[in-house]
Image (cartoon, coloured by chain):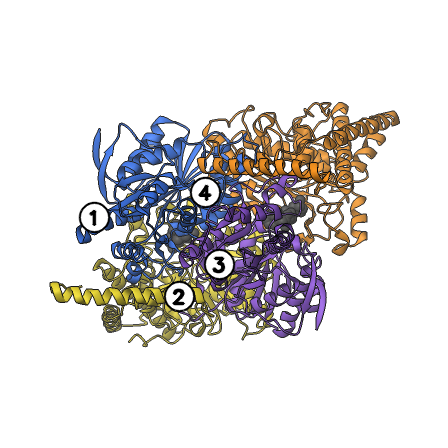
Chain colours: A purple, B yellow, C orange, D blue
């Protein structure tokens, strides 16, 4: 059952199917009802499932997550939409001190099956606070799991898997890719939620990315093959926490080189964690230091120069080149 | 064992059914220091002198049995609380947050709950816990540091203690939204939620967002604020310049102030508010005007920030004293009753102490349990490394202790 | 250049000095959809029909000059706003948040400011910006994506636009605390703060915490809520079940509702509230009841969530229309005036457009500027790498383009 | 002018001196006035400087930071106390979206000289939310600087330097060390705020720590020297952001081995960043992978087993040993 659709539409269809599958699934967020969300990811869902299951909330993110926790305690499975990455911070306390910890606090009695959907990242020409990549904050928080989809197929399935999971999940959506199309096999998911995925095989250098940067990594691999015949192996991380690094270790043992790509600022990002782990696990295989192609340690810049901030094909290839200078 | 819990005081607030002649508000409440705009109107059914007065809207018939039951609750929770404080002083608990002075607010509201209602507490609601029939050892695990509070929140219909100020009020509101979604409002068997929080908590954004949510979704919730006049060292004037209960009105639901040292009034107003909620009338806010007679916690030294005379003035309004006076004056019990109750409470305390001392420490590796319902391969790896490290360490320690004869 | 700013409308709210006979509230405000508990009491001085009415408490004498000045402001800010919308449609701005319909609330409150007062805006206060004498190109840099809003907030006495809903209300409150600390309250030269926010913002914890702080510290601040009935697609019922202005009372300070489409009333109530603040009477909340006549932003499609008849009903209450009717009816101006004003506004718009198109993009490396006042060695390193990378890239690009003749 | 005092007292004296030096310095927080703070760090300061400069605030952390920003805009230099690490999260939005970004947003016109003091870390037998180590969240936020003191001398000087700095600074105080004594030279500070410091020279392995773990690192060095004569070189990081890693690189080039110690959970922590950087900079010098001795990826455990969570001398020595197995 392969259908071609955009990532946005795949998320919409995945949410629809999750709601059909389980009447306890609720959607909550600002403007997700009549409007269908500012990105239309919940388009038509309120019309079809009613105001009781698709809830336009007051404008307060702590309230969204806090009441979602309460609804989960009551047996519901709330899926919260945070309108933009930069607006998750008012909910940070509820996410970090409450949502993340409840299962442990309750001695394993009370799971909170809450999904927090966050359209994240830049590249859409937006004003400040609309292009952030806050995933590292959540990955550093025990008790949360963090995933990001990069293709329509994954969007369709990962959102369903996230909703079906009893773990609290931060679901990072690559907003600049919402309109990109791809094939979705609606009959089977293939991969578990927290597995990374070898997207393209290669022998010369491994490139790891997630979310919106996967496309950049793949493009870089194509360009490298054309430019100088280098074969890049591309891994889509998919799960930012927990990390599924075995495929990365295996790849690096083969290629001896690793480039990690993400939009978030460098310092304290998840690429530091990956680089550190890989440097340990592949100590004798690495032929060059792990390179990280990331956003810079600056506030996300004004839209007119955001492309200079965002990793692109050239910066990835430059990093690959640098791994060959060692 | 602490199973000898009182039968629920079963009175129903007979909303005005027994309309005693309206009395002028008694002088029971002198102008309290902790308040800027003096507001003498608050619900009281029992004066500090032990006089039973009527209120035009909150009249309740209690049987003698019920009076005794409430009194027993008050005495027992104070006794158990004192035992916990003593345990802390002896190093058996890391810290203890005493309910001293707030027994009436907690027992009154706690006994007003229907079985099906859900409680969202702070860290101080030991009295409510008692009313829910939860073994009083439960919160001591948290304060001893062996767990995070060990009761089954679903079975007990009382959620876990919440240390982050105000956070639980949003959970309570969400839970109440769920009740409405489940169609469990509109009849006597409807469900309601009670959310406890302090005067200090009213400043937190979360509490105000709860008010917004509860109002917008017309949820079956009672916000129960124990205004004990202090948030650690800060008097309530640091949180509010108007009486707290008035805040509700601005959000579009009713608020009222009750004498929180009066167990009967606390019972009556809570019962009424819960019943309104379960019948679909939406949220309300109760400000239980009370006083934290002890320290904030055992780590606190209140002499640094409040004067003895203030504490003494409030001792005259002690919630147990007035109930005892009432029972004596009305001859509802005799002195043997008081003695019997005292030894019952002592026994419970002795039992509690013994069981606290016997609480086992958790296994170190248990910290890796229950992080995720579905586990995590990455975390499992950490756990294995942890186990391997300790195994190696123990091996070498055993070795070392063999050599050195040390006690590791 | 947009220096041709109007002289501040200098009227002072002559608190009741000119007590016109109290009139029944005019029918200017029909029962609005965006409200659950109907509250017909709000301050109005000019009806939608252009009739000048008096209010017992908010009577103001305006000179003809001032009427003309206010009208000119309204017309110009609407015209400039329309130009910005057009610029966005043509791809010259990334997005634009139009003030259409809210001109009176903004000009009225903006002209009520004293020179020394400080403004904390949201992202929509283009009208207030105009009143502060700030070049109207300033916010367009933010929406074009060349900067974050380029004016000098200290010199202009108006802070930067704030996109994170509600955040600025706490800054405003803190700033007002600073005014009090500086002893700058208590006289006509006292300073006051005005904090703008929307109806949606009232749900955010930060706004409520601001109310707590402002009340507890009795700060010289006016909370100015433009209730334009919507937060993007959500009608105000999603945020509040009681009229927003009533919230103030629960925190212990006064709140009132003004006809936000009436520039005279908006001026009068704001002036009074600011004066009270600067004289040490503390905070107040003004709810300017208005309507967002256009989309939330140029990215929004309001036809998805509201019906045309609602918009049409509000068009009858247009803030400019009623002022025009008034000026005509009172013969304060002739038709030549309107024509002259129109071409003045057009000229300003043409000028604005030209200057927007000429706005240079920032230098890429400028993103490393201004991260820290004291810089950072680690960041300087990143900047150097960035420069080196681009230098190398440009070198090879130059080379490549030489070879391929391409245009990179 | 050497005086012996505890870290707590040194902070108190440093704050006092900062307030004497600049009348614009204000202290704000819960219970910091009459009570002097739950740890008495502000003891007697309200008495001496008045309620106008030492402000007992309402109980709301977002309010504390948000109004501090406003006061800074007015020309004040607020020093906020967050009562415990676990209670900084309600203020997270104000810190991350407002405090961190204002200087950049204003095009360099408006600096916010705000210091946020956070007693952090475990080891004091407290209940949940009182033993957290949230520094990585802040280190991952461009626009903030993050420091931690480990000795009375540094406590005394670093707090003054932080207050005098125009950068927004997260000042992490090692709460379990408040009562530890040491010498304070009140006449000179020696080091700038954002410099790391070589505490103890050694040749065999470098150990990097900050805040409460510095003492553990030093103890480990002493024990190693006694146990098997290994000479550990100990570096006190002092600045968590920006990182001053030159001394670390130099040390690792000498020792070939590195162990990083902190209490915060492993994944996404600052040690990943350091390890990744060191692996790159010292690619040819490292004789073993960088080892990280940290908290685990679990919610901070109940007090009775917190010592099993916290890095200690044995775990550090174990990691040092492991660097010698490569
Ligand atoms: C978010 C948060 N900030 C600070 C604290 C520290 N703290 C614990 S109890 C308390 C005072 C609470 O006062 P109140 O709400 O009146 O409740 P009470 O303790 O008086 O029952 C404070 C500040 C906390 N637990 N959570
Ligand atoms: C914290 C936060 N959450 C969400 C948003 C997205 N957002 C931008 S404007 C808006 C609606 C604001 O409504 P209101 O406060 O009524 O102001 P208005 O736009 O109507 O002037 C929302 C939800 C935001 N900017 N900040
Ligand atoms: Mg209190
Ligand atoms: Mg609005």
The residue sitting at 26% across, 27% down in the picture is D187
Label 2 marks which chain's residue? Answer: B
Residue bearing the label numbered 3: A252
The residue sitting at 45% across, 66% down in the picture is B119
* Above or below for B60 versus B25: below
Residue bearing the label numbered 1: D222
Give the image location of residue C190, x and y in percent: 54, 26
Question: How many angstroms separate mark 4 from mark 1 (CA)?
Answer: 42 Å
Question: How many angstroms separate mark 4 from mark 3 (CA)?
Answer: 48 Å
Give the image location of residue A264, x and y in percent: 54, 48
Question: How many angstroms separate mark 1 from mark 3 (CA)?
Answer: 38 Å
Label 3 marks which chain's residue? Answer: A
Task: Indicate which disc residue D64 carries.
Answer: 4
For label 1, the SS is helix
Q: Quadrant of the C terminus of chain B?
A: bottom left
Quadrant of residue A34 within the rendered picture: bottom right
Q: Is mark 3 within 8 Å of ligand 2?
A: no
Question: How many angstroms separate mark 2 from mark 1 (CA)?
Answer: 31 Å
Asked whether, in this view, residue B362 is left or right of residue A59, the answer is: left
Question: How many angstroms separate mark 2 from mark 4 (CA)?
Answer: 40 Å
Task: Indicate which disc residue D240 carries.
Answer: none
Question: How many angstroms separate mark 2 from mark 3 (CA)?
Answer: 20 Å
Label 1 marks which chain's residue? Answer: D
For label 3, the SS is helix
Crowd tier of the residue under label 4, counting other residues whose Cα lies within 10 Å: few below 14, some 14–19, many 20 or above: many
Asked whether, in this view, residue C19 is left or right of residue B89, the answer is: right
The residue sitting at 46% across, 38% down in the picture is D68
- Depth-wise, is mark 2 or mark 3 nearer the camera? 3
The answer to whether marks 2 and 3 sit on the same chain is: no
Residue bearing the label numbered 2: B381
Q: Circles 2 and 4: CB distance less than 8 Å? A: no
- Depth-wise, is mark 1 or mark 3 nearer the camera? 3
């Amino acid at each position: 059952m392969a259908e071609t659709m955009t990532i946005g539409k795949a998320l919409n269809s995945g949410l629809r199917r999750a709601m059909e599958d389980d009447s306890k699934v609720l959607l909550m967020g600002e403007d997700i009802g009549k409007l269908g969300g500012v990105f239309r990811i919940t388009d038509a869902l309120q019309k079809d499932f009613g105001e009781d299951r698709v809830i336009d909330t007051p404008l307060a993110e702590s309230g969204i997550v806090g009441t979602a926790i309460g609804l989960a305690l009551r047996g519901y499975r709330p899926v919260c939409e945070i309108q933009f990455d930069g607006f998750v911070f008012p909910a940070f306390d509820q996410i970090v001190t409450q949502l993340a910890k409840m299962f442990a606090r309750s001695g394993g009695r009370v799971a909170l099956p809450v999904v927090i959907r966050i359209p994240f990242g830049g590249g859409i020409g937006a004003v400040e606070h609309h292009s952030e990549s806050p995933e590292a904050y959540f990955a550093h928080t025990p008790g949360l799991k963090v995933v990001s989809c990069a293709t329509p197929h994954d969007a369709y399935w990962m959102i369903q898997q996230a909703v079906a999971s009893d773990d609290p999940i931060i679901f990072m959506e690559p907003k600049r890719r919402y309109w990109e199309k791809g094939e979705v096999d609606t009959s089977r998911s293939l991969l578990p939620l927290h597995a990374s995925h070898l997207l393209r095989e290669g022998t010369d250098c491994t490139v790891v990315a997630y979310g919106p940067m996967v496309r950049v990594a793949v493009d870089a691999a194509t360009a490298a093959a054309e430019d100088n015949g280098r074969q890049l192996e591309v891994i889509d991380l998919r799960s930012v926490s927990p990390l599924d690094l075995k495929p990365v270790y295996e790849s690096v043992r083969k290629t001896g080189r690793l480039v990690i790509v993400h939009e978030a600022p460098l310092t304290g990002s998840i690429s530091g964690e990956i680089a550190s782990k890989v440097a340990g696990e592949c100590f004798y295989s690495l032929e060059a230091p792990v390179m990280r192609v990331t956003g810079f340690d600056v506030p996300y810049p004004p839209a007119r120069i955001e492309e200079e901030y965002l990793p692109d094909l050239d910066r990835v290839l430059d990093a690959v080149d640098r791994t060959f200078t060692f | 064992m602490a199973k000898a819990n009182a039968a629920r005081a079963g009175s129903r607030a007979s909303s005005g059914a027994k309309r005693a002649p309206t009395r002028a508000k008694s002088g029971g409440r002198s102008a309290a220091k902790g308040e800027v705009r003096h507001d003498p109107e608050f619900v009281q059914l029992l004066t500090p002198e032990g006089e039973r007065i009527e209120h035009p809207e909150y009249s309740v018939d209690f049987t003698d049995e019920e009076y005794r039951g409430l009194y027993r609750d008050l005495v027992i929770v104070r006794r158990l609380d004192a035992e916990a404080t003593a345990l802390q002083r002896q190093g058996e608990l890391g810290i203890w947050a005493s309910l001293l002075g707030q027994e009436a607010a907690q027992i009154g509201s706690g006994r007003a709950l229907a079985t099906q209602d859900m409680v969202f507490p702070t860290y101080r609601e030991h009295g409510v816990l008692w009313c829910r029939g939860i073994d009083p050892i439960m919160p001591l695990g948290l304060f001893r540091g062996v767990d995070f509070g060990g009761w089954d929140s679903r079975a007990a219909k009382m959620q876990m203690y919440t240390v982050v100020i105000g956070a639980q009020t949003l959970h309570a509101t969400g839970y109440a939204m769920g009740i409405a979604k489940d169609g469990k409002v509109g009849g006597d068997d409807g469900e309601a939620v009670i959310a406890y929080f302090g005067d200090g908590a009213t400043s937190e954004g979360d509490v105000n967002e709860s008010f917004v949510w509860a109002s917008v979704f017309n949820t079956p919730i009672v916000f129960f604020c124990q205004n004990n006049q202090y948030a650690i060292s800060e008097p309530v004037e640091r949180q509010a310049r108007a009486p707290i209960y008035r805040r509700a009105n601005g959000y579009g639901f009713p608020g009222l102030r009750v004498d929180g040292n009066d167990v009967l009034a606390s019972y009556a107003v809570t019962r009424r508010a819960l019943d309104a909620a379960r019948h679909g009338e939406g949220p309300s806010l109760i400000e239980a005007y009370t006083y934290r007679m002890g320290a904030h916690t055992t780590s606190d030294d209140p002499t640094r920030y409040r004067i003895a005379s203030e504490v003494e003035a409030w001792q005259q309004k002690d919630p147990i004293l007035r109930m005892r006076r009432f029972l004596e004056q009305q001859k509802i019990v005799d002195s043997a009753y008081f003695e019997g109750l005292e030894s019952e409470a002592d026994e419970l305390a002795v039992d509690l102490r013994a069981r606290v001392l016997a609480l086992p420490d958790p296994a170190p590796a248990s910290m890796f349990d229950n992080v995720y319902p579905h586990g995590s391969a990455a975390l499992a790896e950490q756990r294995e490394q942890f186990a391997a490290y300790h195994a190696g360490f123990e091996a070498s320690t055993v070795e070392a202790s063999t050599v050195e004869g040390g006690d590791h």
